[in-house]
Image (cartoon, rainbow, N blue to C red):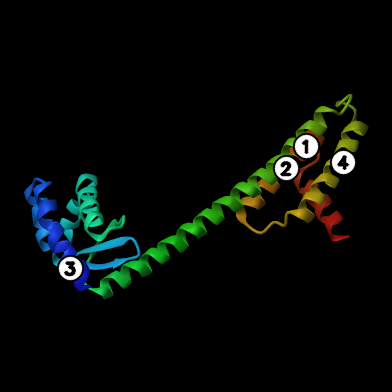
Amino acid sequence: MSDVTQVWNEALPEVRNGVTGVGVWAALNTSKPVILEDDVFVLGVPHEESDLAGHLKLPATRLLIEKAMSARLGQEVKLRVINGTSMTDWETEKRRDLEARRLQEQAINRQMAEIQARTSWETIYEQLTRKYAAVPNKSLPQNRASFFVEAIDLIVEARKSMPINDDLAERNYARCLERVSQYSEVPSVLVALAVSDKIGR
């Protein structure tokens, strides 16, 4: 702590000379070095002066601080400005970082699952379209019946490999059932029953 404080005190005049504006000067004067952790230089702003933190986060000011500190520490450092000036404040900030990363990972995983589900059922939807396009004499009921049987088999296999476990998959599955209903002229409820019947066997 004492080392990084000394280095910051040495770097501060250089940083002040490179900035203009009352807000930036006030932010520099109230800020306190908290810790150098790995390559992160943590600079804290007192809670009661938290509105000044934004001045230290400005790209030009950030770059100036990082350059001045890196030169004196003999290593490349990244600036992290936090609210508060104690180690407790820094630990709180790190916990927030972890929680934010966890939530971000959850959101990404959920998004990926949605994309996968949409893509998988979209593939089935397109296969149904192609299968119907290949049916000869679509006006003949027996040909539409053949399509119906093949379409049900296709959806049954899809259901076995892609369980319906969320609302998005449920909607995409329903969309495929509606497509079969539209092409075969069989009510969508009966299409769903036909699939359920085969899965239940």
Q: Which residue is mark 1?
A: 128
SS assignment at label 1: helix
Amino acid marked by disc 4: Glu
- Tell me the number on the disc at residue 5: 3
SS assignment at label 2: helix
Q: Earlier in the sequence, mark 1 or mark 2?
A: 1
Q: Earlier in the sequence, mark 3 or mark 4?
A: 3
- Which image quarter is the C terminus in? bottom right
Q: Which residue is mark 4?
A: 150
Q: Earlier in the sequence, mark 2 or mark 3?
A: 3
Residue at the farthest left position: 22
Q: Earlier in the sequence, mark 4 or mark 1?
A: 1
Give the quadrant of residue 81. Answer: bottom left
Residue in the foreground of this view, choosing between 164 and 110: 110
Residue at the farthest right position: 142
Q: Earlier in the sequence, mark 2 or mark 4?
A: 4
Give the quadrant of residue 11. Answer: bottom left
Disc 2 to disc 4, C-alpha distance: 13 Å
Please give left or right for residue 116 compared with residue 132 in the image.
left
Disc 3 to disc 1, C-alpha distance: 69 Å
Amino acid marked by disc 3: Thr
Disc 1 to disc 2, C-alpha distance: 8 Å
Disc 2 to disc 3, C-alpha distance: 65 Å
SS assignment at label 4: helix
Q: Position of residue 31 (x, y in %)?
A: 15, 63
